Amino acid sequence: MSDLIIQKKEYLTRMALASLKRTANEYINLSQICHEYHQEFGYQDYSAWVKNDLGLGSRRADQLLNVYDRFGVTAVTAVENLPAEIMFILAAPSTPESARTEAIEKAENGSYSQYPKSSACCRFCLVM
């Protein structure tokens, strides 16, 4: 493996480890770093990196890619007011777009914990 690749991997690892706090903003940052690593080195290497160097499981690795895929660089403004676990639920491919949109609108208004029980976001209000 070339020195340049090793240096890039070490750099991304340091950045990712610095971002492993349990806040949505930090996870958003981490999702962007993970996306870059995944794009540069492929899924197999990415999975090994997340497990071996970051100490995270494969489920969290996939969730981080989902966050980037769903929200990209706009994630900070879209979900920064939500708890990290809710952000992962919203980013999941199985989450209906209508529920995602409603939750983000509520979060932007600062009222994410006020979902009506009949809402499409019911499973989110139970968690929050």
Image (spheres, rainbow, N blue to C red):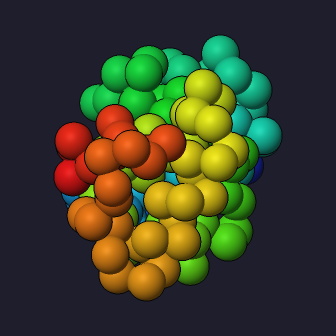
**Residue that extends furthest to the bottom in the rendered view of this protein:** 109
Q: Quadrant of the N terminus?
A: top right
Q: Is residue 82 visible?
A: yes
Towards the viewer: 75 or 50: 75
Image check: 3 left or right of 64? right
Q: Is residue 88 visible?
A: no
Q: What residue is at 60 percent from the left and 26 percent from the top?
A: 94
Residue 77: percent from left, percent from top: 56, 79
Towards the viewer: 42 or 67: 67
Total residue callouts = 0
Q: What residue is at 75 percent from the left and 26 percent from the top?
A: 42
Residue 37: percent from left, percent from top: 65, 43
Picture quadrant where residue 53 is located: top left
**Residue that extends furthest to the front in the rendered view of this protein:** 118
Q: Is residue 52 above or below residue 83?
A: above
Towards the viewer: 2 or 77: 77
Picture quadrant where residue 96 is located: top right
Q: Is residue 90 above or below residue 106?
A: above
Residue 125: percent from left, percent from top: 27, 49
Image check: 116 left or right of 58? left
Residue 109: percent from left, percent from top: 43, 83
Image check: 84 left or right of 78? left
Q: What residue is at 55 percent from the left and 60 percent from the top?
A: 102
